[in-house]
């Protein structure tokens, strides 16, 4: 089922910037269920997310070389979104893990420390993570804001009511757009499909197509 999907524009490479400025506004998440007749049904949960105190700074502050530490970002995102059964991490409420536990328990974090995590969270314009102190222990904890294949309880992210968000956007490649046209948006092993509620001011190199979602129409099918 292709519900409320519209290609707004194919972005020419000449207009693509190296870093996308993503507004940390509303994420629309489209879980796909299977009905008794075998057809796919799209249900919609639209979640409002705040910046959670994350302050944007220049990329020059991320590492001595002035570049975002992609190795740290990818390793951290993989653990917080998909887990690591061998390490036996137990998620805290809201999908958090203690930073100290992550740094000591995973070989991919050798040489990294808490200040490195702070710098990564601050410089990440896509707001992939929320970093905060645990109220009970006072220790720092971190979570991924979206993209989970793990079942994560996020009670502090309220659902947006129907008719509160009119439209949202999904960014993809031309190759992936061919599958979306045929099959619709799919979770592909994750809990939700994260969307944004505004067109960003600049685009990532692999963003060749942006798809506008009719959120009201999708929610009406829930």
Image (spheres, helix red, strand yellow):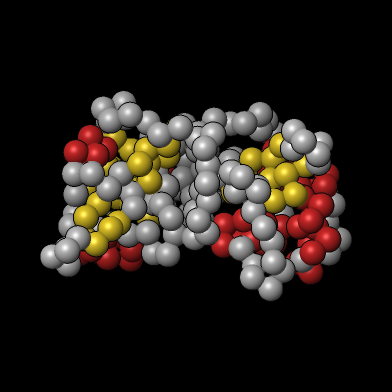
How far from the left and from the top, in percent, is residue 57?
70, 34
Q: Visible in this render: residue 221?
A: yes
Q: Quadrant of residue 38?
A: bottom left
Q: Quadrant of residue 167?
A: top left
Identify the residue at the far bottom of this view.
86
Depicted 77 relative to depicted 19: above or below: below
Specify whether 206 is left or right of 82: left
Q: Quadrant of residue 39?
A: bottom left
Query: Which of 169 and 82 lies nearest the eye of the viewer?
Result: 82
Residue occupying image coordinates x 19% and y 38%: 220
Residue occupying image coordinates x 21% and y 55%: 41
In the rendered view of the protein, which quadrant contains the C terminus?
A: top left
How far from the left and from the top, in percent, is residue 79?
64, 61
In the rendered view of the protein, which quadrant contains the N terminus?
A: bottom left
How far from the left and from the top, in percent, is residue 146?
51, 48
Query: Which of 173 and 195 lies nearest the eye of the viewer?
Result: 195
Label count reads 0
Depicted 27 relative to depicted 99: above or below: above
Q: Visible in this render: residue 17?
A: no
Specify whether 166 is left or right of 124: left
């Amino acid at each position: 089922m292709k519900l409320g999907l519209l290609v707004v524009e194919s972005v020419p490479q000449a207009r693509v910037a190296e870093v996308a400025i993503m507004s940390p506004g509303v994420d629309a998440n489209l879980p796909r269920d299977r009905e008794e007749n075998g057809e796919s049904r799209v249900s919609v949960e639209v979640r409002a997310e705040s910046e959670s105190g994350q302050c944007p700074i220049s990329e020059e502050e991320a590492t001595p070389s002035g570049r975002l530490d992609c190795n740290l970002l990818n390793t951290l995102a993989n653990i917080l979104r998909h887990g690591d059964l061998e390490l036996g991490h137990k998620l805290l409420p809201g999908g958090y893990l203690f930073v100290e536990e992550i740094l000591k328990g995973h070989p991919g974090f050798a040489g990294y420390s808490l200040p490195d995590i702070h710098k990564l969270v601050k410089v990440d314009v896509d707001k992939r993570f929320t970093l905060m102190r645990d109220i009970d222990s006072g220790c720092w904890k971190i979570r991924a804001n979206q993209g989970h294949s793990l079942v994560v309880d996020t009670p502090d992210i309220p659902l947006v009511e129907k008719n509160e968000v009119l439209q949202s956007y999904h960014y993809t490649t031309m190759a992936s757009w061919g599958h979306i046209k045929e099959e619709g948006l799919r979770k592909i092993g994750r809990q939700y499909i994260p969307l944004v509620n505004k067109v960003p001011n600049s685009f990532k190199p692999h963003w060749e197509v942006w798809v506008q979602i009719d959120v009201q129409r999708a929610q009406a099918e829930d």
